[in-house]
Amino acid sequence: MPKILTTESGAPVADNQNSASAGAYGPLLVQDQHLLEKLARFNRERIPERVVHARGSGAYGYFEVTDDVSRYTRAAFLGEVGRRTELFLRFSTVAGNLGSNDAVRDPRGFAVKFYTEEGNYDLVGNNTPVFFIKDPLKFPDFIHSQKRDPFTGVQEADNVWDFWAHSPASTHQITWLFGDRGIPASYRHMNGYGSHTYQWVNEQGEAYWVKYHFKTNQGIRSLDAGQAAEVVGGDADSHQRDLHQAIERGVFPSWTLYVQLMPVAEAADYRFNPFDLTKVWPHADHPLVKVGRLVLNRNPENVFAEVEQSAFSPNNFVPGIGPSPDKMLQGRLFAYADAQRYRLGVNHTQLPVNAPRATEAATYGRDGFSALNPAGRAKNYEPNSYDGPAQTDAALAAPAELSGWTGTYPTPAHTKDDDFFQAGELYRLMSEAERGRLIANLAGALAQVTRDDIVERNLAHFHAADEEYGARLEAAVTRLRTADES
């Protein structure tokens, strides 16, 4: 009999695959003690560096609206063509620690803090439009599999691929990661994506689901495995150095922001779950709509104070923008801010890089670690008779209709909701040369796995995505493993 998985209080865990939600499509529930305990403990595993996205670079700049999108959102900073909003953007690798190398095969974080006149808006994404998992309950497990093994102290191929072997939904992101864009030549030469689905609401109260795409204006440039090894051997800080020096020279990197928009009513009958982070929305269904231009034009004066202490939370919304039922986003609404309260303290939002710039925060929060207490003698309760700040009664986003019983649910499948279809489509979009490099990259990594059953389970995923994809990868892995044994 296998051991029973329990919470930290010893209670048995009924479901470690799905978070509790308000109905099959509903948002997640604060009463899900297992989810909150798991995410809260995960956020506190390292001190003081970030558990993930530890190695990062950042710069200040601005966002300028170039196209009118006011019919889709009432967010003031997007309200008129020509409006500029100051911002801070932090790039990062995901799995490495603070002292790791820049030019490695790893997703890149792309986190933007817009200092808007209605408060700070944080958009936290990556340089890929998809991710490895669908449910935040699995995020600590996923990252543990990619980090150093508790016994050997190094990253183990067996752990990496064992998790993926049990996570077929990862196949799409793995295909991205081991393809040509898996190692960007620099932060300037890669795209950024909001990745999650968000909500936009216009002045009339009409709501849209939205995805963000930041397209680099420098062009996509990436490194193959050999080039990356050479760069790492010569300069572990290649991405940081490139970004800093480009801005110092006056070569200001920029990205054009596009969005995809889906009327809320379309989501229920869409052919796959539009809130699934492992899938993209085809552009044929929802074409890109141009919004504006993001420009980086100023380096931080102090990397620790501004890059290391920058803190982002996807729960920092402004009027006209809100969350969606995306389960991964729902988990991050809690986990990101909680991680920064642990890492930097409860008053981290008062640090200059995190504080609002185009407006002023007015809260009843006081005291705690590193408290500045800018409110002085003002009362710390509400309501009060001393002209303290009061609520607006105007919701930031539109309400969502919910139904169903509380519980842990796998999300109901739509007609195209399998784990492999889009991975196969991505493979078939590649040229023959791109496919060859993808197979070589994957085979080189998978051949390092020592257990046959883990190799076989992963190969089955690639066969399911595309038979040619799976067959070529299987042959390449077999050749490499046979050569190692001889």
Image (cartoon, rainbow, N blue to C red):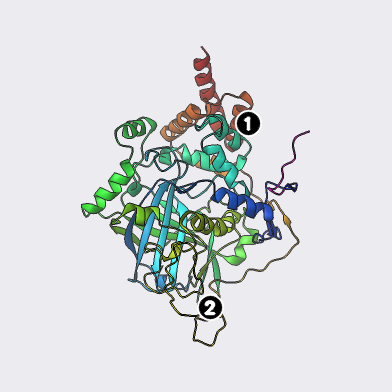
Residue at the top extreme of this rendering: 486
Secondary structure state at the residue bearing disc 2? loop
Amino acid type of the residue tagged 1 in the rendering: Arg
Q: Give the magenta-colored segment's residue range.
A: 1-9
Q: Can residue 414 be seen by looking at this rendering?
A: no
Residue at the left extreme of this rendering: 249
Vertical placement of residue 338 versus 12, above or below: below
Vertical placement of residue 319 versus 445, above or below: below
Secondary structure state at the residue bearing disc 1? helix
Secondary structure that dominates the magenta span: loop
Which residue appears at 46% of the width and 28% of the height?
440
Location of mark 2 (residue): 204
| Residue 152 in the figure: left or right of residue 60 | right
| Residue 179 in the figure: left or right of residue 252 | right
**1 or 2: tag closer to the N-terminus:** 2
Number of numbered discs overlaid on the protein picture: 2
Which residue appears at 33% of the width and 37% of the height?
236
